[in-house]
Amino acid sequence: MIGTFLPLYSVEVSSDIGAGFFGSKPDKDCRDYKWLYKNYQQALMLMFVVEEINKNPNLLPNLTLGFHLYNTYHSDEKTLESSLRWLSGQGQLIPNYSCWGKDKAVAIIGGATSALSVQMGTLLELYKYPQITFGPFDPMLSDKVQFPSLYQMAPRDSSLHKGLVRLMTHFEWTWVGLVTVDDLRGEEFLQELTLEMANNGVCVSFTEKIPVSERRHTESHMTFMSRIMGSSSRVIFIHGDTDSLMILRYSQFPFLANYKVWVTTSDWDITMRPKYIDGYYFHGALTFSHLTSDVPGFKAFLKTVTPTKYSEDIVLKEFWHSAFRCRDESEELQQEECSPNASLENLPLLYFDMTISDFSYTICNGIYAVAWTLHEMFLMELEKKSKVEGESWIPHPWQIHSFLKKIQFNNSGGDQVFMDENRNPEAQYTILNYVTFNKDAEALKKVGQFNPKAQPGEDFAINEEAIVWGWTFAKVPCATCSESCGPGFRQAPLEGQPICCFNCSLCPEGEISDQMNMKHCMRCPEDEYPNKERNQCLPKTMTFLDVSEPLGMTLVCAALSFSLMTSMVLCIFVKFQDTPIVKANNRALSYTLLISLIFCFLCSLLFIGRPTAVTCLFRQTTFGIVFTVAVSSILAKTIMVVLAFRVTIPGSRSRKWVQSRVSNSVVIICSGIQMVLCGFWLGIFPPFPDMDPHSEPGHIIIKCNEGSDFAFYSVLGYMGFLSLCSFTVAFLARSLPDTFNEAKFITFSMLVFCSVWVSFLPTYQSTKGKAMVTVEIFSILASSAGLLSCIFIPKCYMILLRPDKNTQESMKNKVSSRRRKQSRSFSVNSSQRHNQF
C-alpha cells in the first residue's frame, strides 16, 4: 500500500481550536467545507497509475499495489491529525498503534506545499517512512540531516526568476510589483528575482508578503490588497502556492483588479477559485507552468471515469455529484439529476482540466519510483531463493531507503526520472494566457515558452499577438515609473529615486539616441553627423574651398586682378626705367619686389580647390618664400635709404656700402634663411592632405595638415621679424629730406603689412575648416595689396599723371628750394646722389 495525502477540500480551521483538538471530530472544528475540484485529477492519476502497474506483468509480478487516500488540510493541526489517523488506521486516533493489519503502507506520497511536507515529515520521520513530495522543489527540504526520509520529485525552479525577468525586459516592464509568500522559500526567491531585476534595469515598485499562517480566507482583511491595488505599477508578479494565494481570490476589489496585469508562477493554479465571478479579475493573466510530457493513456482514462465504473469509490461519487450538481438521495436540495452522458471532459476549467497538471505528472513519477523500488527488492528476494509470496511479502519502510535513493528509470512519457535530488533536472516552462469570458468559458492557452537549457537567444519565445491583456488593455500595458524617452532623448536619473524613475533630457550636441529609453546618447561616426532631431546619423558631405563656390570665385578673381595690376606696374617701371623716379628708387630692387608681389598674389591660388599632395606640400612654403623675398627687398630698400643719407659723405670709404651688390646680398641672405627653414620643414614634417570631420556639422573638411605647427609658425615668425626690421628702419628714416625718399611710403606699407598679419594670428587660431583657409588667403591678398598700393601707386601717379615733375631739372629746382629752407647744408650734390640711387 502507498499512503497518499492530497488537498481535495478547502476548509477554514476554527480559531477556537486549542491544545485539546483531539477531543472532537474534525468536522466540528471546520466550516466552509468546499471541494477543490481541480485537485481531484491528482486522485485520478493515482488510480490510473496503480491500475497500470497492476496490469503490467513486467513490474511487480505476483504483487498487487494499492493506496490509501487522505485529505490534507492546510493547517498544522489537521495535517498532523490526518497523518496520525493514517498511522493508526481504520479511522482510529491511537498513537503508536496500527489497526491496518496486512494493508500496511511502505511509502507516503504527499506534500503539495513545503509547509505540508514539513508538517507531515515531523511525524512520519519517527517511523522512517519514505516521504515522496510532489510539491514545488524546495532547497530547504534537501537537507538530509533534518529530512533524511524525504524525497522531492519536482524539477528544480532555479531558473524561474530568469524567465520572469526575460518576460519583463521583453515587454519593457521596468516598474513592477512583487507578491510572495512570507516563508524561507519565498524570501529566497524574492532575493534571486530582485537581484536579476537589478542586473537588467528593472525596479520594484512594491513588495507584499502574504503570511503563511493566514488560512482564514473569508475572515482576512483587505489591508494588503488595498496596498497592491493602490500601487502605481500596472503589472504584478505573484509567487506562491495555490492555498497561500487563495487569499487573493477572497480579497479582490471589484473592478479595481481589472486595471492590473497578473503574472503568476507554476505553483499557483490560477483557475482554482471559490466563486464563479472571481475568474474575471484575473482575465488576461500570464502564468509560467512546468513543461511536462503527456502520460500515455491518461486522457483516455479520464474520459471513461464515471461513478458507475468505480461504484465502490465514495470520493469519486461525492466529487461527481458536487461537480455535476446531481440529485443525491441523502440530500434534501432539489438538484438536477446527473446526465447519463456526463463526462469529465464536459466540465468547465473551473472544475476540471483534461490537461495533465504539474502535480499529477509528479505524482505519476513518484508512484512509479516506489513501484520500481519494490520491484528491485522483490527480485533480490527471489535471487536469495527465499520463499516469497506476493500476498505476505511486505518490506519494512526503513528497508526501502537504500533502494529508493538510487533508483532511476524512464517514465512512460520518455523522461528520465532520478530519485537523487542532486540530479533533478532544471524545469522548463510554458507560458500560458488565462482567458475567461463567463463561468463556463475559460481557457489557458499557450503563448510562449522558456527553456533555460537552450542557447542564448533561443531560450525565450513569446507570441504577443496571441495574448489577451484583460478587460482594460488592448495592447501591451506600459509598466514604467516615468514616461518613455523617445529617440533623440536620454534618461536623466532623479536624485533619490530608483534608476527606473527619470526625466527625459535632449541629447548633447553631436550625439544621438536612436532607440527608446536610452540611458546614454552616442556619438555618430566621424563620417556622419546628427540630424536636427538628434535621432539619426546622416552622412557628411566632403567640402573644401572650391573655385565653383562664390567665395572661391571671388578670391580667385581678386588674386588674378591684383597680380595683373602688379604686372602693369612692372611694365610701367620697365617702360619708364630711365626716368629719375624709377632710377632714384633702385630699379633692381623695385623689379624684384614687383615680381615677388605677383607671385604673392598668385600663390593664394594654391589654397583654393581640393587639396592634393602637391598643393599641400608647396603652398605654405611657396607663400613663405615669395613673401620673404618681397619683405627682404623692402628691407634692402630701407637700408639703402638710410645708408645714402648717413654714410655717403664725399670721399668716405663707407660709400662702398651703398652699392647694388649690398642690397642684392640682403635679399639673397634673408631669402636664403627662409628657404633653409622651408627645406627642413619639407624634409622632416612635410604637409599632407587630411580630413577634418569635426569643424563644421554635416561636413568633412578636406584640408592640408601642416605637418608641424612649430615649422609653420617659425616661417611666419621669421617673415614677421623681417617685416618688423623693415618697419623700424623705415620709421627712423621717414623724415630724411629728398624728393624721392621712399621711407615714408615703406613705413606706411609695412604698417599695413604688419597690421594684417598681427590680426591674422588670433583669427586663424579661432577659426576652423574652410574659414582658416579663407582667412589666410585674405591676409595674403590684403598684405600684398598694401605693399603694392603704398609703395608703387604714388610712383605710378608721378610717372603717368605728373611727368613734368619726373625730370632732372624739376628735381634740381626742388632740391635747391629745400636747401634754402633748411638750417643745415648738405655737401653731397643732389644730382649725384640721385644717380647713385
Image: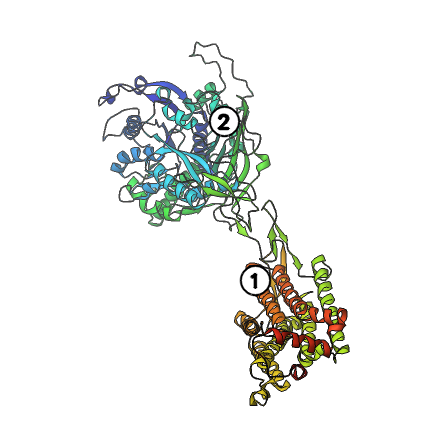
Q: Nearer the viewer, residue 183 or 274?
A: 183
Residue 621: tell me if it is visible.
no
Extreme residue toward the front, this view: 820
Q: Nearer the viewer, residue 789 or 271?
A: 789
In which quarter of the view is residue 811 placed? bottom right
Q: Nearer the viewer, residue 415 or 671?
A: 671
Mark 1–mark 2 CB contact (< 8 Å): no
Q: Amino acid at mark 1?
A: Ser
The C terminus - image quarter: bottom right
Q: Position of residue 279 (x, y in %)?
A: 49, 24
Mark number, residue 767: none
Q: Amino acid at mark 2?
A: Tyr
Which mark is in front, 1 or 2? 1
Residue for badge 2? 259
48 to the left or right of 775: left
Q: Position of residue 447 (x, y in %)?
A: 55, 37
Q: Please tell me whether residue 222 is drawn above or below residue 688 in the rendered image.
A: above
In which quarter of the view is residue 193 placed? top left
Q: Please tell me whether residue 545 is drawn above or below residue 129 in the rendered image.
A: below
Residue 30: tell me if it is visible.
yes
Q: Please tell me whether residue 167 is drawn above or below residue 683 in the rendered image.
A: above
Q: Residue at x 23, y 29 (%)?
A: 95
Residue for badge 1? 759
3D distance between C-alphas at marks 1 and 2: 71 Å
Q: Nearer the viewer, residue 188 or 791?
A: 791
Helix, strand or loop at mark 2: helix
Query: Does label 1 or label 2 sit earlier along the sequence?
Result: 2
Helix, strand or loop at mark 1: helix
Mark 1 surroundings: few (<14), some (14-19) or many (≥20) residues within 10 A: few
In which quarter of the view is residue 674 placed? bottom right
Q: Position of residue 180 (x, y in %)?
A: 38, 34
